[in-house]
Amino acid sequence: MTLDAPLTGRDPIACEAILANALLVLPDRVERGWIAIAGGRIAEIGEGDAVPAGATDCGGDLLAPGLVELHTDNLERHLEPRPRVDWPHAPAIIAHDAELAGGGITTVFDALRVGSIVHVSGAEKPYARGVATEIAALRREGALRIEHRLHLRAEVCSETLLEELAEFGPEDGVGLLSLMDHTPGQRQFRDMSQLRAYVMGKHGLSEEEFQAHVAGQQALRARVGERHERGAVEAARRLGAVLASHDDSDREQVALSAAHGARIAEFPTTLEAAEACRAAGIAVMMGAPNLIRGGSHSGNVAAADLAEAGLLDIVSSDYVPAALLQSAFALARIWDGDLARGFACVTEAPARAAGLADRGALRTGLRADLVRVAERGGHPLTRGVWCAGRRVA
């Protein structure tokens, strides 16, 4: 290895950092080399064993683009760590931010539910507008380590969806809006036994209370569902947000999502739906827990099966932030060791689907969002994270 080699074409003093002796996860391959950071962007990339003067020696660790997270329920877990326990919001947001940064995530679309049931005692209440305002305030104050954007999860089977959507405007920078429909008996919960186990376990309902819940939700969907769906699609256009479908199960549902203008399919539940998404040009996103655990907890199609069929484009951490980095390695094992392809599903592909052209890959001129990763016992270990060139973990 050559020590103190000159930095090609650039004065090293002008660089904020140089990371060398790393295995660079480039868009199409993994290659040993170095990266220079200046002005929060990737100033230069060099391949080979050279270590430029003043560089940090990464000791042969992987250096990959920072991960891009499009759909995570993790913030809600921090806001309500136990059922009906409302944690102070600012500390919850800061803890959520630190957890994501520690897992190599440098851009997150925080998923906030819009659409609530308000007439039932103890039911979920509106919260998205207030939390979005608090996230924006913490961002202005410089209290957050990574970049936070908004993802509104528009719950069609609800009472307050249109009123809650009306509280958001283009100035809020909503990047994603997903059409959610958790009406019992379809999409994610086509299998009523799975729904029974989930709802009764989470909320402690009796069988009689569960049946009343099912009947009430189905009646509500019949009354407001179509109007809410139209209103959510219009809200996405008004807000300039990318539209995503959620839990599409068959070709008819995918066709409707395509007609609405959906560009991302979150967690299609069947192989049929994933194939229809590919035919319609809709990017398929699956959950990292599904991939890591080897199957869906709801009994739906396995993410690994879609990966093996060449139908998986994007992975989301869903409810386990650390699983996003694990997924890149899990996909590489499925795809004959192609680590670049595995990382693309958690970096460049989600960035592109969300309309972010300035990040997601190791290319000169893009944001210096980087994660340094070592492997220990076959598991990824985060050794350093940079967001727009600033060390955040």
Image (tube, rainbow, N blue to C red):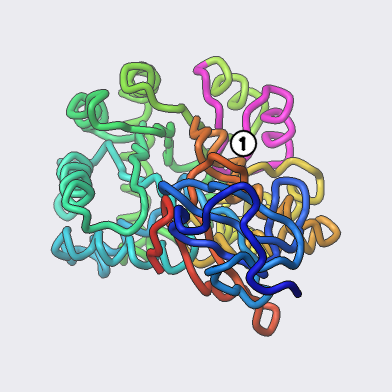
**Residue type, numbered disc 1:** Ser
Is 279 in the magenta?
yes
- The N terminus lies in which quarter of the figure? bottom right
Residue at the limit of the structure toward the right, as seen here: 336
Residue under the image location 32 percent in, 47 percent down: 213
When the figure is inspected, residue 202 is found, relative to residue 379, above or below; the finding is above
Q: Residues within 10 Å of mark 1 (few under 14, many from 20)?
A: many
Give left or right: position of 392 versus 370.
Answer: left
Magenta stretch in the rendered image = 260-284
Residue under the image location 26 percent in, 23 percent down: 170
Q: Position of residue 197 (x, y in %)?
A: 46, 62
Residue under the image location 18 percent in, 39 percent down: 129
- The C terminus lies in which quarter of the figure? bottom left
Circle 1 sits on which residue? 249
Is 152 in the magenta?
no
Q: Position of residue 351 (x, y in %)?
A: 53, 39
Q: Position of residue 16 (x, y in %)?
A: 43, 58
Q: In this view of the protein, can residue 205 be seen by the observer?
A: no
Residue under the image location 42 percent in, 48 percent down: 40
Q: In this view of the protein, can residue 296 be seen by the observer?
A: yes
> Which residue occupies the foreground of this view, 234 or 386?
386
Q: Position of residue 258 (x, y in %)?
A: 58, 20
When the figure is inspected, residue 122 is found, relative to residue 329, above or below; the finding is above
> Which residue occupies the foreground of this view, 252 or 108?
108
Q: Quadrant of residue 150?
A: top left
Give left or right: position of 333 versus 80.
Answer: right
Residue at the limit of the structure toward the bottom, as seen here: 377
**Count of marks overlaid on the render:** 1
> Which residue occupies the foreground of this view, 197 or 17?
17
Q: Quadrant of residue 33?
A: bottom right
Dot 1: element:
loop
